[in-house]
Image: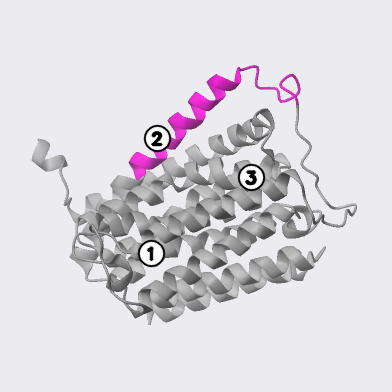
Amino acid sequence: MVEALSPPWPLGWSVGLFALVAVVTVVASIRMAGLGDVLADRTGWGEAVFGAVFFGTATSLSGIVMTAVSASVDHPGLAYGNAVGGIAAQTLALAVADFFHRRANLEHAAASSANLLFCCMLIGLLSLALLTAFGPDVVVLGVHPASVGLVLFYAGGLWLIQKENKHPMWRAVRTTETVVDVPETEDEDGTGARTSVLWARFLVVGAVVSVGGWALARSAATIVEATGVSAGLVGAVAMGLVNALPETVAAVAAVRRGAMTLAVAAVIGGNSLDVLNLAVGDAFYRRGSLFHAATADELFLTAGALLMTVVLLAGLILRQVRGWGRIGFEGVLLIAVYAGIVGVLAF
């Protein structure tokens, strides 16, 4: 019985499990959006910083587990593709969430200096990952020095963003469509629960998502081995899309709750943590540097994620009120760029 439940599983089981865990992820993410919105107010961090750090961490748990498991079972293409593919798919999630905000472009409504700085930090992290792949193949104590560099870069970026958030030197122009993050009091949020209870619920839901990530990684490895499909394609598209499900669903749910800043911050924060997944995968990959195990497909995907982040940053700066087809110009471009990336990887 134990052997039957141990991976690798039959192809049919793997596909079914992949779909089942995806559904569970959707349900858990909706719950996390509500809890995250309340906790952002209770902690005093605000939607932008809380969404990018705590919410981004919780929604990225499944991706972290997927990357670690894939690297440990000698599937570096899946590990790298999942981390970077999740970034591309999650950035696309903002275009999806934009459809649910009818009054104006989401990037216009959610303008904040913190979100701009998180985009800048993400561009820096992706650039560092690309530079590492083309640099010397050096491993110290089982990891590439750049893995430590990514973590330090992220920590330094968080420090600067938190400092700027307390004493902002830049503010977005207020318009009738700008949704300002105004914290609700404990009596106004309607939960009727203590903050400690809300944290406990938040952590439980995050744990469910992380266990699902392990199952997704193992089922994806079976699909690659049984079908012969490119690991980069499976990691970038199949695993990447499922990895993006928490952020996508959470962003839509946040928009429906009126938490526009949280919607954008959750995606950008999750993306930044996904770059750190490369450091996690590097630590679990025993055959050298994960950065140098990446193929041309994975590096192409990294450049694509970098381009999509630049497009998003441009949208947050220009703040188009209304664009093409109920979404901003950046939303249309994000859809086009992501379709092009998938098309190149598929053919």
Residue 189, compared with residue 341, is above or below; it is above
Spot occupied by residue 223 in the image (x, y as percentages of width and height): 25, 61
Image-based side of 63 in relation to 252, left or right: left
Helix, strand or loop under label 2: helix
Count of picture labels: 3
- Magenta stretch: give its range: 185-212
Q: CA distance from mark 1 to mark 2?
A: 28 Å
Q: Residues within 10 Å of mark 3 (few under 14, many from 20)?
A: many
Give the main secondary structure of the magenta stretch. Answer: helix
Residue at horizontal 44%, vertical 54%? 151
Q: Is residue 195 magenta?
A: yes
Q: Residues within 10 Å of mark 1 (few under 14, many from 20)?
A: many
Q: Which mark sits nearer the N-terminus, 1 or 2?
A: 1
Query: Which mark is on residue 49?
Result: 3
Residue 291, picture quadrant = bottom left
Q: Is residue 6 magenta?
A: no
Give the residue pinned by disc 2: 207
Q: Is residue 277 visible?
A: yes
Spot occupied by residue 249 in the image (x, y as percentages of width and height): 55, 47
Query: Amino acid type of disc 2?
Result: Ala
Q: Nearer the viewer, residue 220 or 66?
A: 66
Query: Amino acid type of disc 3?
Result: Val
Q: Nearer the viewer, residue 336 or 52?
A: 52
Image-based side of 200 in relation to 287, left or right: right
Give the residue pinned by disc 1: 146
Image-based side of 346 in relation to 59, left or right: left
